[in-house]
Amino acid sequence: MLIEQLPPESALSTQLRLEIGDAPPGHDHDPETEQWSRTEHLLAAVKDELTALRYSYTAAHSKQRPRWKPAPTPRPGVKSKKKRSRLNNAQVDALAAHLERTQGDPLNN
C-alpha cells in the first residue's frame, strides 16, 4: 500500500518504470533522466507548446517582436542547449593582471 502511494519521481517508482518499460521514449536508462513519469514529461511538452503558441500569436499580432523568447521547461537530467559564456585567453590574462594589482599575487602569498 505504501509503495503504491510513492510519488512518480521517487527512486523506487523510477526503478519500477524502468523494469516494466514505461520510461519516456528516446531516453537512455539513466536514473537522473528518469525522475519524471510519462505524465510529467507530457505536461512539460504541453507547456512548451503553449508557450511557443503564445509567442507566435504575440509576434503575429504586434508591430514589434516580443522581447522574450520561449524557453523549454527544464527536465531532470537533460542539459540546457543554452550557450554558456566563457572567457577567452586574453580576458583571463586581463582578469589575472587586475587581481594581481588589486589583491597581490595569490600564488606567492
Image (spheres, rainbow, N blue to C red):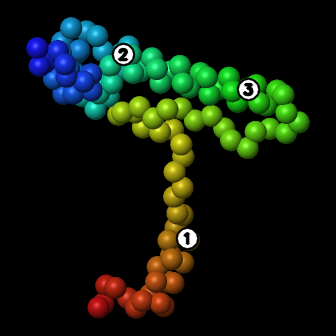
Distance between the Cα atoms at labels 2 and 1? 45 Å
* Residue 66 in view: yes
What is the crowding at mark 1: few (fewer than 14 residues within 10 Å), some, or many (at least 20)? few
Amino acid on which disc 3 is placed: Ser
Locate residue 17, reporting x and y percent: 23, 14
- Residue positioned most to the right: 63
Please name the residue shown 51% across and 51% down the image. Answer: 84
Query: What kind of element bears circle 1?
Result: helix
Sequence-wise, the earlier of marks 2 and 1 is: 2
Left or right: 55 in relation to 51: right
Distance between the Cα atoms at labels 1 and 3? 38 Å
Q: Which residue is mark 2?
A: 38
Please name the residue shown 80% across and 38% down the image. Answer: 65
Sequence-wise, the earlier of marks 1 and 3 is: 3
Amino acid on which disc 2 is placed: Arg
Distance between the Cα atoms at labels 2 and 3? 27 Å
Q: Nearer the viewer, mark 1 or mark 3?
A: 3
Total numbered labels: 3
- Residue positioned most to the left: 1
Q: Quadrant of residue 51?
A: top right
Query: What kind of element bears circle 3?
Result: helix
Q: Which residue is mark 1?
A: 91
| Residue 4: assigned label | none
Left or right: 80 in relation to 107: right
- Residue positioned most to the top: 20
What is the crowding at mark 2: few (fewer than 14 residues within 10 Å), some, or many (at least 20)? some
What is the crowding at mark 3: few (fewer than 14 residues within 10 Å), some, or many (at least 20)? some
Q: Quadrant of the N terminus?
A: top left
Q: Which residue is mark 3?
A: 56
Amino acid on which disc 1 is placed: Gln
